[in-house]
Image: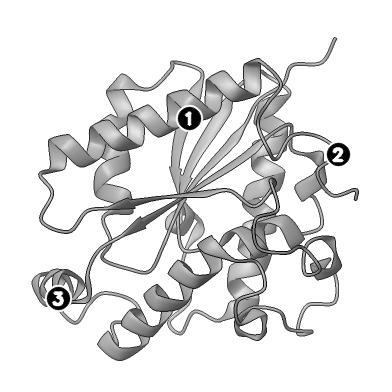
Amino acid sequence: MPSLAVLFKLTGSSCGGKTTLAVAVKESLDPQIELHDFDEVGVPEIPSSTWRVRTTEQWVRAAIDLQGEGRHVLLTGQTPLGELLAVPSAPQLDGIAVCLVDVADGGRTTRLAERGSSHPGANLESLINWAAWHRQHAADPRARQQVIVRDDWPEMAWQRWTHWERGDPRWVVETIDTTAVPLKESSEEVLAWVNRQLASWRDGTLPLRPGWEHG
């Protein structure tokens, strides 16, 4: 019998706290969960949506290889649920769970200033707009789909989910707001989310389990 595993995704616009939280929970994760950052494979000087979806497919393929060994992946990065579901190999994953890590605009502004101009794509207005869209997308698959649904990479299978309505049981994105919340508290929320998804996957109730793309 083949081994099975889940791809856990922490998503959101820059400066929300994804990587910080992932590092904070690393030692407390189930030992079968590997932690990776989307940018490990390299980031172009000007990241594009095409680069992001192609790289998402690369990470999905890596997760599929690891699930053959019974190893889960916790991946940080900005890929929203809709892009993840549309990459060619997504249906081959044994389970998918996505969490939006968010922060109020003021907090994002402060964090960006602390990081400095070396941060890739460090344009405050674009980060705030992208964050606002992430919130809408997390709540409703129909929200401004045109932001990500494009034809610049024909392999993308957007039709898997673009007809889903708000409230579809498969469209589940938990949000963790890190605004003025101590790191310890936020990291505990992330760890609790991971453990809940893992338990749901084990008992067969994870919303994005094999066959999610049908119907």
Under circle 1, the secondary element is strand
Instruction: Name the kind of residue labelled 3 in the image.
Output: Gly
Determine which quarter of the picture holds residue 190: top left
Up the image or down, 70 lies above or below 96; here it is above
Q: Which residue is mark 2?
A: 211
The residue at which mark 3 appears reads as 106
Residues at circles 1 and 3 in contact by the CB criterion of under 8 Å:
no
Q: Position of residue 16 (x, y in %)?
A: 28, 61
Residue at 28% from the left image edge and 82% from the top image edge:
122
Q: Which mark is residue 192?
A: none
Color encoding of the figure:
one colour
Quarter placement of the N terminus: top right
| Residue 157 is at least partly visible in this image | yes
> Which secondary structure lies at badge 2?
loop
Q: Which mark is nearer the camera, 1 or 3?
A: 3
Relative vertical location of residue 43 with respect to residue 99 in this rendering, above or below? below
Q: Which residue is mark 1?
A: 34
Q: Is residue 156 visible?
A: no
Q: Quadrant of residue 6?
A: top right
Choose between 150 and 159: the one closer to the eye. 159
